[in-house]
Amino acid sequence: MNETAHALGTSRTLWELLDRRAALTPDRPVLLQDDRTLTFGELRSRAERVAAGLYDMGVRPGRVVAWQLPTRIETALLSFALARLGAVQSPVIPFYRDREVGFALRESKAEFFAVPGEWRGFDHTGMARRLGARKVFEAYEALPDGDPAVLPAAPADGTSVRWIYWTSGTTSDPKGVLHTDRSLIAGGSCLAHALRLTSDDVGSIAFPYAHIGGPDYMVMLLLYGFPAVLFEHFALPGALDGYRKHGVTVAGGSTAFYSMFLTEQRKQPGVPVVPSLRLLAGGGAPKPPELYHSVVREMGVQLTHGYGMTEVPMITMGAPDDSAENLATTEGRPPEGMEIRIVDGEVRLKGEAVCRGYLDPEQSAAAFDADGFFVTGDLGRLTDSGHLVLTGRLKDVIIRKGENISAKEIEDLLHRHPAVRDVAVIGLPDTERGERVCAVVEQPPEAEQLTLAAVTSYLRAEGLSVHKLPEQVEIVDALPRNETLRKVLKYKLRERYT
C-alpha cells in the first residue's frame, strides 16, 4: 500500500476519508455511469447538499434509514450523505421482496425508507406502503437537496455502529449484521492492499451497491484515487460496451462473473473481450480450480479470488503475484491486521474488519468465542505459506452468485406444499453460479409428481425472492437419514447429484 493510501486508511470515518481524498484530487473521476462522470470533489459537495436535504426531512445522527436502491451514482450520493449525518444505514438488496424487506424494516426499526419507485417492472414504493414502512421517499433520480449551513458537525467517532447489513445465514430469517465506519474502512483497505491496484486503474461495480461489497469497493477507490464504472443491471454481452468505453482494467465480483466473461471470450478466441482488462477479482462463492486456469489461459488476464462474508467483508485474498497453484486452489492469505485461528477444523477470525455482532443479542453472544474470535462456521486449513484452503461449511448455506441463500427458508416453504412429505435443499457445484439450488423431495403416496416449474411457481406465490428459486428438483422414494435422530444426511445427496 502506498504512503498516501496508508495515511488515508487511518481515517476515523467514511466521511473523513472522502473529505481527505476530495482535498487531494478533487477533479479526478470516481464514479462513471453511462455518459455521466462524478469527481471526488463533486461526490463530497453533492453528498453534503443531499445530507442537508435529509436533515430538513428530519434525519438526524443515530436515526435508522433503510434504503433499497440499485447500483447508481445517486445511491452512492445518498449513502455518503447519510454517512455525513452520522445516521445508521440499513442497505437492502434491490431484488429482495416482501418477506425479507418487511423483516429488515421491522428488526432495524427504520424511521425512513428510500426506494427507487418502480424499478425493472416492480413497484418498490407500493411494497413499502404495503409493509407499513415509515417515511418512504423515492431516491432514484431526484435526491433531497438543502443548504449545508444547516448541518451539525460531521461525526468524528468511527467505532459506533452505523451500518446494518442483512445476511440469511442458516436460519429462515435474515440476520442484521452490525458494522462501524472503521470496520468497513478496514475491509476496503485489506482488499486494496491485496490487489496491488494503482491510481491508473479503472474498476467496476457490477454487483448490488447495497451488498457489503459496495462500501468495500468505495473505500478502495478513495484510498487509491481511481474511478469505477457502475452497472445498474449487469448482463453480458450487453455490459461489454461500458467496460470497453471506459477502459476497465479490473472487473469481477464472484465466480458467476468469471464464467460470464469466459463465455464471451470463447465467442471470439484470441480477441480480448475487453482489451484494457488485466485482472478479474472477487469472492463470495467457491471457485473451481479449472475455472482459474481457463480464465488465465483463454482470456490472458490474471484472476485473484478471496474469502469474505457480510460479517467480515475481507478475510483473505489472492494476490496477483501469488503462484498459479495458490491462486487456483486457495482463497489467498489474510492481510495485516486479520488473525485467523483454526479450531477443530473451523475458521475463526479477529481483526478490525470483523463486525460488532448482530442485532439479536443471542446471535451476537454465540458468534464469538471466549477469546473474542468470530466463529465463521466454515471449515478450512492454513498452508505453510499462510494461504487459506476452505474444505467445507458447517453452516447450511448455499452461495449462489455471491449471495447467501438459506436452505431452511426454502425447506420451510416447501414443507407446506400438500405434495411434499419431506424435503432437503442443497447447493450443488456450478461453474457459472458457484452453487445452484437443488430441492430433493420425498412425496406422499399417490401424490402427483412435482416438476421444477410447479415448485418454482409455488415458491414465487409464497413470496420467495427470484434469486433463491431452485434450478433443479429431484424426486426420491426416501431421503437418506442417520440411525439415531433420523436426521437427513445431506452430504449423501450432494454426493449423489454432484
Image: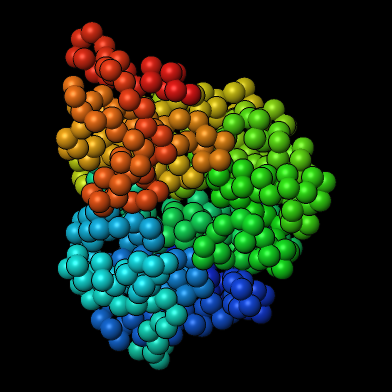
Q: In x, y percent, where is residue 415? A: 20, 34
Q: How is the image coloured?
A: rainbow
Q: Is residue 202 visible?
A: no
Residue occupying the point 56% across, 64% down: 231
Q: In x, y percent, where is residue 70? A: 44, 66
Q: Look at the picture and state if 194 lies above or below 22.
A: above
Q: Look at the picture and state if 323 lies above or below 168.
A: above
Q: Look at the picture and state if 98 lies above or below 140.
A: above
From the viewer's side, name the closer residue of 399 and 377. 399
Q: Quadrant of residue 165?
A: bottom left
Q: Look at the picture and state if 74 lies above or below 460.
A: below
Residue occupying the point 74% across, 53% down: 273
Residue 224 as seen in the image, left or right of residue 413: right
Residue 332 as seen in the image, left or right of residue 202: left
Q: In x, y percent, where is residue 293? A: 71, 33
From the viewer's side, name the closer residue of 91 and 184. 91
From the viewer's side, name the closer residue of 272 and 8. 272
Residue 2 as seen in the image, left or right of residue 59: right
